[in-house]
Amino acid sequence: MFETISALTLGVSLSACAGLRAIVPLFLLALGHKMAPSWVPLVESLEWMSSWPAVLALGCAAVVEFVADKIPALDNILDVIQTPVRTIAGGIVVAAPLVELPTWAVAIMVIIGAGSAFSVHGGKALLRAASTATTGGLANPIISFLEDIFTWVVALLAIVIPILVFLFLSIVAFFFFRRVRQAWRARQGATA
């Protein structure tokens, strides 16, 4: 039971990270399984991800994603292009460690993981668009670097202490959506 809860919270936490960086959660999941397969399980159909060629390819792709996201204008184009990529990555990372769940439960979790990644990506894209509009893109590399730090730290911690990271992300999401709802109501009141 604990392993299942741990795998669920790991997957959901990594899917949120996939909304910021598509490749980093995949890379860390594959590397984690390569180094400690009993600690970071992968379903049999995705065990190929932990082969050295796949780990190296994911590592190289993570570096490309890191560099490309620091270039103003290109970062906004990548946000558009990577919308489906990040959504799919969110579905993959949430399903990958679910070795003990039936197929129907994994399918539900894939939908949740893809939705989580899509939601985080949508918020990120809006922040980047606002940054581009207000600073001409000058702040985008700084924001990108902060996103990198957040993604790497949260994804690494999710592998080590998945339940605590899941609780932390749940609290952050609660306060974020509460703040958005308050801003929306205030704006509706101002226009009425």
Image: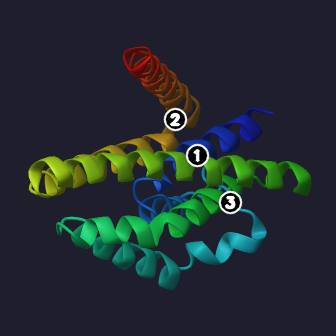
Give the number of the mark in front: 1 or 3.
1
Q: Which residue matches tag 2?
A: 161
In the picture, measured across the screen, residue 10 lies left or right of residue 185, that is: right
Q: Quadrant of the C terminus?
A: top left
* Dots 1, 2 in contact, CB < 8 A: no
- Please report the residue visible at 48 percent of the width from the left and 19 percent of the height from the top: 178
* Dots 3, 2 in contact, CB < 8 A: no
Picture coordinates of residue 112 (x, y %)? 69, 46
| Relative vertical location of residue 127 with respect to residue 114 in this rendering, above or below | above
Give the number of the mark in front: 3 or 2.
3
Q: Amino acid at mark 3?
A: Ala
Q: What secondary structure is marked by label 3? A: loop
Q: Which residue matches tag 3?
A: 96
Judge the density around disc 2: few (<14), some (14-19), many (≥20) Cα neighbours within 10 Å.
Answer: some
| Relative vertical location of residue 92 with respect to residue 4 in this rendering, above or below | below
Q: Quadrant of residue 50?
A: bottom right
Picture coordinates of residue 145 (x, y %)? 21, 53
**From where the camera sits, is residue 102 visible?**
no
Q: What secondary structure is marked by label 2? A: loop
Q: Which residue matches tag 1?
A: 116
Judge the density around disc 1: few (<14), some (14-19), many (≥20) Cα neighbours within 10 Å.
Answer: many
| Relative vertical location of residue 153 with respect to residue 90 in this rendering, above or below | above
Q: CA distance from mark 3 to mark 2?
A: 17 Å
Q: Quadrant of the N terminus?
A: top right
- Please report the residue visible at 55 percent of the width from the left and 32 percent of the height from the top: 166
Q: Earlier in the sequence, mark 3 or mark 2?
A: 3
Closest to the observer: 128 or 185?
185
Q: What secondary structure is marked by label 1? A: helix
Q: Amino acid at mark 1?
A: Ser
- Please report the residue visible at 17 percent of the width from the left and 66 percent of the height from the top: 72
Closest to the observer: 49 or 166?
166
